[in-house]
Amino acid sequence: MKARVFVTLKPSVFDPQGRTVAEALHTLGYDAVEGVRQGKYFELDVRAGTPGEARALAAEVADKLLANPVIESYRIEVGEV
Amino acid sequence: MKARVFVTLKPSVFDPQGRTVAEALHTLGYDAVEGVRQGKYFELDVRAGTPGEARALAAEVADKLLANPVIESYRIEVGEV
């Protein structure tokens, strides 16, 4: 089963990487892109009987290793593929 | 309008970052996580009249700056928030 984990900086945390991407886009003429936040994306192949089990495992793993809960939040999606 | 861009290495490209995360998880006892692929995640605030317009802009920006089309592929989701 696939679990997708999206890790982003919390809204109150400054995101210099995203800011740099936004500035580069403005330099290229893409003024319609008003802001960019960058995050991390993980695709986990998990051995789990049910989607709920896969989600619980992904949440545990995100808390322990993938995200820094002080400054980051995460979102999980579970699917067969 | 929000456009979310997920950039991942193509399946045929070796992903040392994901491999390292997978090994760290196995060391922590999470053997049920069989594999990990890591990618990048961008949230763009775009000024666009329609979702289609936002998607087209995000695709252009992904091709030009966010992804390296030789080794990476991307997926786009568009939403109001």
Image (spheres, coloured by chain):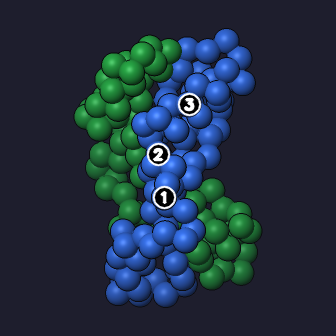
Chain colours: A blue, B green
Percent x, y of residue A67: 47, 45
Q: At label 1, which amino acid type do we have?
A: Ile
The vertical placement of B70 against A47, above or below, is below
Give the residue displayed 41% in from the left and 30% down from the top. B36
Marks 3/2 in contact by CB < 8 Å: the verdict is no
Q: Quadrant of the N terminus of chain B?
A: bottom right
Q: Judging from the image, what secondary structure is the residue with disc 1 in?
A: loop
The chain that hosts pointer 1 is: A
Percent x, y of residue B43: 54, 64
Mark 3 or mark 2: whose residue is earlier in sequence? 3
Instruction: Say which of B26 and B57 sits in front.
Output: B26
- Quarter location, residue B27: top left
- Quarter location, residue B48: bottom right
Marks 3/1 in contact by CB < 8 Å: the verdict is no
In this rendering, position of residue A58 left or right of residue A49: left
The vertical placement of B44 against B67, above or below, is below
Instruction: Say which of A21 and B23 sits in front.
Output: B23
- Check disc 3 and report the residue beneath it: A60
Give the residue displayed 31% in from the left and 55% down from the top. B68
C-alpha separation, residue under disc 3 versus residue under disc 2: 10 Å
- Check disc 2 and report the residue beneath it: A67
Q: At label 2, which amino acid type do we have?
A: Ala
Q: At label 3, which amino acid type do we have?
A: Glu
C-alpha separation, residue under disc 3 versus residue under disc 1: 17 Å
Percent x, y of residue A33: 52, 80
- Check disc 1 and report the residue beneath it: A71
